[in-house]
Amino acid sequence: MPTPRSTRSLALASLFLGGVALFPQSSFAYGFDDVEDDYQLLYLSTAVALEGRVVDEDGLAITGASIELIAFGDSLDNDGEGASTGADGGFEVAGLARRSALVKISSPGYYTEILPVNLHVEIDEPEVDLGTITLIEQELGRARLTFGGDTMFDRRMYEKGMLNAATLGSDTRALFQFIEDVLKADDHTAINLETPVTDDLSTPHPNKSYVFAAHPDTVAELPGLGVDSVALGNNHIFDQLDGGVADTIHHLDAIGLPYYGAGADRYAARATAYSAMVGYSETLGDNVPVTMQSFSNSIGSSYGVGLENIALFDIKGGALPSYSTELDHFAQNAPAGSLAVPIIHGGTEYAYAQSSGTRTDFERVIQEGADLVIGHHPHVVHGVGTYATTDDPVFVVGSLGNLVFDQDVYETFRSYMAVVDVVDTGSKVEVERMQLVPIRLDAYAPRLLAGTQLARLGRHVGHLSTMEAQGATDPNWGSATVFAENGRLVVVPTEADATTTDELDQRLVPLSGGSTGTLDFAPNTDTDALASLRSDVPASCEVGRDLLVIGDFEDGDVDDEYLESGKWVTSGSRYVQGSETHSGTGAAVLLRKSSYSSRTALWMGNSIKVDSSQPMTFRGFVKGDNAGEFEVTVRWMTSSGSSISYKTVFEIKPGSSATEGLTYDWTEFAADLTPPANAEKLKVYFRHYPPAGGGDAEVFLDDVSFIAWDTETINVDSSGTDLPTPNAWDFVRCDAAGSSLDLSMTHRTYESQ
């Protein structure tokens, strides 16, 4: 359980600051607004230092490496701040504002690293340690590739003003502003361009519910933003029929942006396979042979027959289908010795594992000689799998998620880019290392994750990666090991390729009605996994994961805002603040006045996907200061968003004769929930009513979790039960006989070797 924190009243009492409103204000200001503004001024004026060490691949110090901060908006005070590394490779940048930023680490002859750094640490923490950063040498026979996910420029981007006809160039650049430096820090960046490129909208596909088009002026910005090629083999390239395909090819040719995976017919699309020399050498220039082709597993037969299919045939344009003949043709005809990378668009939208059909495509193309497989289309991230061959196992990235996309489905907001270093061994090109760059989409634009949000995505992708081999019918499937480290997610072929440390966490837990209730796993580090459970007497245990992820109200990304509400619907009477938290530097506040007759409510603008077969627990912490009634209401919905039921699952109410508001310290609330059989979505509403007495009322909310319990019960006893790792289990609960349970959890943490 997070350690409670009291208000910073003593610190505020020593500082006289006012007059500047930093956070949302209503037309009827609350006294708490001034408290929060004063605290934020104090927080911002309390400098923090950044330190770390830079080494080469052999662990030797790199002297004179440049450290430079890149910052935006509210963080601009940190922009351009920097230092150089000393003789031991160490550095310190002092006097920084507590606003997260990107750190650019560069040295001649090495690849530049762009890393997020979380500077939103608690006010009593004087420095942030970036850790030991390894720079990779640019040398003959080595190249760095970056792969990004689903990208489009249409629909809600125009409706909500992210794209405007008169300013398409600057608007497009704004969509990429927080990741542009990452895209330029490699030798080649490839993304999935999931749209035709045309300004002729006269021929939309007659049978598709969603059709896209990207204006040529938008796509013309991509090369300048660091995009070096685009995959077109997807289920939207035919959205404007043959004319849209022809326009796409024309406009991409005009700006010199390589493409692959679509054409006027099957043979033209085959010929788009991209073969080039990439990499870096001071004397020889590009030097590593790479071949890429993209395919669509979706043929589009549901959109019509023949000419209305989205995949191409001999007589029509469209996406190159992932038929076995096409996969074989690509793998068998890739130039000898080159890195063969099939990019396959397929699977089930919003599913966390690939469909059997797309997995079969992965297997087929690897068996024919592919060296690395990249997937997308589900719009959510997948884990990283491996597939055994006679040589080293091949990495399979099942789904990158979205890069720039206008979806409002909650699960699509977290994604990653894959950065892959490859090396030419002389006989072939091999993957040398893989890292993932975690991102989050706000207002449809990506920004790098940092702090707790980066760690959470790392544990999530590690969990999904562990599951990759489970249930596979082909024994060649394996699970890569993925964990967060130094601002990235590290990917290694097996757990044996990482350094692991196990630590025992023994607890004597009282039993109530034969149950422990919900127990926090409480990870020790960003990479922590639950490796085993052991108990003194037989127990039946369940493990659970938090579906909400953003219930800590922390600012977990690097962009131009601080403590932005993210996906919460806020106003001047409900917002994210930092002067009163249960843990960390952010929590929500719901404000009311005694003179008001109405309540205020906080909720997420997006619903969360649930599995009705999984029992759930809703849990969090609340604090009241002269508070009115507080209640939590759960709304279950169908897949279409229709309401099934509303139910109040928790409330704190003053007595009927109360003459003043309720004041209470941080209090845990929890409710066990059984989803209705037809429930597929969930929303939760937090409501605060006016206080019974006079004055302003405040309710604070923090560390909220929506726990989904795994349906498989774990039988635990004194011999212990091991769990597959890495994983992202956040909570445990057990049933046993007696008055208490001696329960041991093994924490397993990961580091690079």
Image: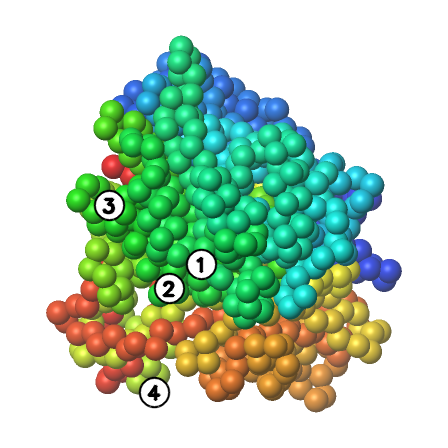
Q: Give the residue number, with chain letter if any, for mark 1.
A: 297
- For the residue pair 481 and 574, the one nearer the viewer reads as 481
Task: Give the alpha-carbon distance from disc 2 to disc 4, as whole Å.
Answer: 47 Å
Res. 357 mark:
2
**Residue 513 image label:** 4
Percent position (x, y) of residue 468?
A: 31, 59
Q: Three-letter amino acid code at disc 2?
A: Gly
Query: Could you tell whether 259 is left or right of 174 in the image?
Result: left
**Amino acid at circle 4:** Gly
* Residue at 57% across, 47% down: 264
**Residue 470 falls left or right of residue 188:** left
Give the residue type that dot 1 points to: Asn
Q: Residues within 10 Å of mark 4 (few under 14, many from 20)?
A: few
Q: Is residue 196 visible?
A: no
Q: Nearer the viewer, residue 623 or 275?
A: 275
Upstream in the sequence, badge 1 or badge 2?
1
Work out whether 513 lies above or below 264: below
Whichever of callouts 1 and 4 sits on the residue coming sooner in the sequence is 1
- Could you tell me which residue is drawn at 61 percent across and 41 percent down? 249
Front position among marks 2 and 3: 2
**Of the image marks 4 and 3, the number of the one nearer the N terminus:** 3
**On residue 393, which mark appears?**
3
Percent position of residue 686, x then y = 64, 73
